[in-house]
Image: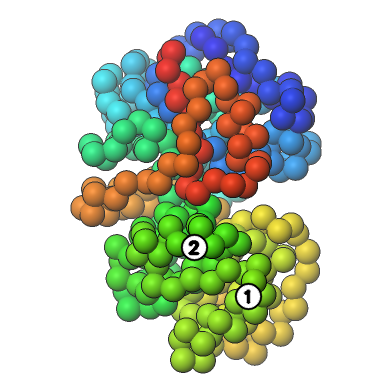
Amino acid sequence: MRAYTIPAFGLENLALLERPEPVPGAGQVLVRVKAVSLNYRDLMVAKGQYNPRMPLPRVPCSDAAGEVIAVGPGVASAKVGDRVCGTFMQTWTDGGLTEAVTASALGGAIDGVLAERVLLADTGVVPIPDHLSYEEAATLPCAAVTAWHALTVGFEAAGKTVLLQGTGGVSIFALHFARALGARVLVTSGSDDKLGRALKMGADAGTNYRTNADWDRWAREQTGGHGVDLVVEVGGAGTLERSIKAVRHAGRVALIGVLSGAGGVNPIGILMRGITVQGIYVGSREMFRAMNRVIERDRIRPVIDRVFPFADAPAAFRHLEGAGHFGKVVIAVENA
């Protein structure tokens, strides 16, 4: 059985190796991986930017879809032949995030899924919507669940205005879900071409932050000067202050990414305008299931930028690093 491992930090060190055939124990399922999708986190893990003290070697990636080919004793949630996705955190079934749950995060705290076969927890798999391919389903566990969490937990999207930053995986899924949930959607991007594609997908308005640095003011203008109800914030320190300015009094900022790096932020705007800033770290299995019901109801199909063969996984990482993609970068595990 072949798997990619990170023996030392750096994309150049990503290595395809033979590993022992996994055997499911109690409460485990063995999945023949059909497809894996990449997230920015996977790039950070490989380069040593996510957790420089992470024990190595490590199998990267959190997002996979495949077929159950064996189950261990006591497994009740899956059977041989089922098409499934793994959950990002294998033990987060429902309720709030805990320290113990974060210790089950695939491709970070524990080995991930960039392999021909993987063992997953009975509590850590969900069925794939029937209309989705394995490549499409592999895009769901991190980016899609993160977007769903931001739009549905502690927030009622119907009739609200949502501002999405960029056109990466989380933001494109948030566009799908915000539309499905009845929200008005504003989008920022550094590419006019990507803005055009987002508008064709149903975004109500968009602006290029490279030519309109005051996109926070633009967002307020789009809402009669009041500000948006929710910002899906993926930039981090470089964009957070403008996100706070873009949101209305008692509005919400869902803090998801750190694409522009870490750093400080002035808390006065948060304090004086009663804004809620909530950290979003993916979501639970129950969130995943609720999201899948809407995906099935509306026949939502994930946007895939490009599919790479398993043998070219390092090229997929480099493509993601180039930041020219629109939607998700996927690796097809064709020889599993």
Q: Nearer the viewer, residue 305 or 71?
A: 305
On the image, the x and y values in percent for residue 34 come to 40, 24
- CB under 8 Å between callouts 1 and 2? no
Residue at screen point 54% across, 46% down? 325
Where 64 sits versus 247, above or below? above
Residue at screen point 49% across, 13% down? 22
On the image, the x and y values in percent for residue 19 come to 58, 10
Q: What residue did someone put label 1 on?
A: 212
Where 16 sits versus 242, above or below? above
On the image, the x and y values in percent for residue 307 come to 46, 31
| Circle 2 Cα neighbour tier, 10 Å, few/some/many (<14 / 14–19 / ≥20) | many
Q: Amino acid at mark 2?
A: Leu
Quadrant of the snapshot with the C terminus:
top left
Residue at screen point 54% across, 12% down? 2
| Circle 1 Cα neighbour tier, 10 Å, few/some/many (<14 / 14–19 / ≥20) | few
Q: Is residue 3 left or right of residue 291?
A: right
Residue 262 quadrant: bottom right
Q: Which mark is residue 236?
A: none
Q: Is residue 45 left or right of residue 328?
A: right
Q: What residue did someone put label 2 on?
A: 195
Circle 1 — which element? loop
Where 154 sits versus 71, above or below? below
Q: Nearer the viewer, residue 270 or 139?
A: 139
Colouring chosen for the image of the structure: rainbow
Q: Is residue 24 visible?
A: no
Q: Amino acid at mark 1?
A: Asn
Residue at screen point 33% across, 52% down? 291
On the image, the x and y values in percent for residue 54 come to 73, 34
Circle 2 — which element? helix
Q: Is residue 299 left or right of residue 324?
A: left
Measure how far apart labels 1 and 2 are at the Cα level.
13 Å
For marks 1 and 2, the one nearer the N-term is 2
